[in-house]
Image (cartoon, rainbow, N blue to C red):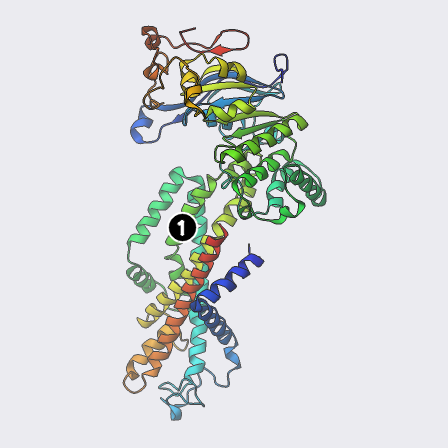
Amino acid sequence: MSTSNVKALIEIKHLKKYFPVKGFKARKKKQMLKAVDDVTFTIKKGETFGLVGESGCGKSTLGRMICRLYDVTDGEIIFDGTNIENLKSKALKPFQKRIQAIFQDPYSSLNPNMTVAEIIDEPLEIHTNFPKKDRLNMIKAILIKVGFKEEDMNKYPSEFSGGQRQRIGIARALAIQPDFILCDEAISALDVSIQAQVINLLEDLQKEFGLTYLFIAHDLSMVRHISDRVGVMYLGQLVEVSTSEELYKEPLHPYTKALLSAIPVADPDQKQDLGGDLIQGELPSPLDIGEGCRFRSRCPFAMDKCAKVAPELKKVDGERVVACHLY
Amino acid sequence: MFNHRHIETIKKECKAHKSYLFAIGFLVLIVSLSIFAFLLPYSPNAVNVGEALQPPSLHHLFGTDDLGRDYFTRALFGGRISLLVGLLSMVISTSLGVIIGATSGYFGGVIDNILMRFVDILSSIPWMILVTVVSIYLTPGLKAIILVIGLFTWMRTARLVRAETLTIKEREYVLYAKLSGQSFRKIIMKHIIPGVLPTFIVSSTISIANAIMMESALSFLGLGVQQPLSSWGSMLQDAQSTLGNAPYMAIIPGILIICTVFSFNKLGDIFRTMTVKKG
């Protein structure tokens, strides 16, 4: 899908989320955990934006801020021209109808005490005024769309497998015809064959309804197949944003290279040589980041400059941006 | 909450465990007998000294006591009191426990800390001492004993419900409800309460058993229900003086207490397996 001239659906500007650290000492020092620290990007109408990064890099926090599950510390979230970062209950409601989410764990994302029909009815009950009978017909239609039978609506989630449950989650998100769906690690808990099945379903639905996705994942292999553009996050910041084609062909940021080289391949001889060793060590604590580039402690190309000046996101070519002193 | 699947599980469990069948059967029997005790030919308080201390016979199923009162009738009326105490104090203790536990778990932070430390303090005092001291200040009787047991046994339920609330509020379906704009009240009604319910039911059946035990112990010490009312506990106490020539007077209420407490505990087990199977 060509996305270069399409209007933006979501614009994120300098978004920040700091969590106060628990404990007496930390509170006294006003220590903050910078989960998301100054992130700026846009998601265009009809595209799939992939967001990747290690566990704990802030990608889920970012997604939850867009859904307004978390309050924003600073920055802007512009949804279709309206700032939504400070909207409260009533004013937020029309946007809650347009922003939906699919979660990671298919076992905890569906209430085990409710039938499939009751689960999918929840958003319909909140956001529509249709009588119960009409809603039931809508639920039937949506269930068939995601590959179930009508009879399945009276079953409980425990009667379905992980992949099937995830499809129920998709049906629930689709029920009120949103514009935007946040897929927070939506396929990470599934096995590979089911992952492909769910991805195909998501793609078909995108074509049919013109949906926009923010696809959060911790590995790049699946993101490649579904995303139009990909953003790579490291310790609360975006380090590279690129079209998914270019990112896989020629990763720029050393961290992106490391992530790509970590994807297992079927034939080890075919492995792309990315010119750098795998990164060493653990993610440093997000509590004391210090000055300079956040990746320098693990970067094979770190220079003196990296310890002093934090790199800004720079346009490299076309739509591609990267935050690294090498470019 | 209950549907055909639950009934199926109960049937299956009862086939596998004969003790479940006994428990349910015994509870149904003892509850219905105590309710319909007024249909019996004797009055529980009709004194007939001429027939005192008669051993069990066809005429008097459980014999008579030292005042010639029909012991079967007295046992059933006593059961009424014991069950009533168990049930009502369970209602008090579980409602307190659920309210305090759910508040503590849902809001967290300072509220949680204050409530849970209070629970810790109350639980660290042995209940027997607590209840004995408190009952000195109240006029002994049915109301006092229900209140005392209810007000000092809710801590365990509160802890259980708090833990359950803590896990449920982090589940992704609660997050989903929040981001979809579901109201705070409906999240509690539709997601939190039904999730806590299984724990709550299991804990309340066991509370009944505990309350019956406590009531018996207190009545045995003379702090419980007073004459002419009797409960199984006070019947045990009355039986002490005639233990030598009428041992059945102690054995009968003793067996009734044991069987009832056992059955309520088993009922808790049945509910527990039902909720686990559902998972």
Q: Can you give x and y, in whole percent of width and height, for residue B259 in the image?
A: 40, 71
Q: Is residue B106 left or right of residue B255?
A: right
Tag 1's secondary structure?
helix
Mark 1 burial class by Cα count in 10 Å: few <14, some 14-19, many 20+? some
Nearer the observer, B249 or A266: A266
Q: Can you give x and y, in whole percent of width and height, for residue B80 in the image?
A: 46, 72
Q: Which residue is mark 1?
A: B160
Q: Is residue A247 above or below residue B74?
A: above
**Which corner quadrant of the image does residue B67 belong to?**
bottom left
Which residue is situated farthest in the bottom direction here?
B50
Q: Can you give x and y, in whole percent of width and height, for residue B266 in the image?
A: 42, 64
Nearer the observer, B253 or A6: A6
Q: Quadrant of the N terminus of chain A?
A: top right
Q: Is residue A272 above or below residue B161?
A: above
Q: Is residue B186 above or below residue A67?
A: below
Q: Is residue B7 left or right of residue B84?
A: right
**Which corner quadrant of the image does residue B151 belong to?**
bottom left
Q: Chain of mark 1?
A: B
Kind of residue indicated by mark 1: Leu
Asked whether residue A65 is in view, the answer is no
The structure residue drawn at horizontal position 42% and vertical position 57%, both measured from the top left corner, is: B203
**Which corner quadrant of the image does residue A42 belong to?**
top right
Q: Quadrant of the C terminus of chain A?
A: top left
The structure residue drawn at horizontal position 51% and vertical position 24%, both measured from the top left corner, is: A223
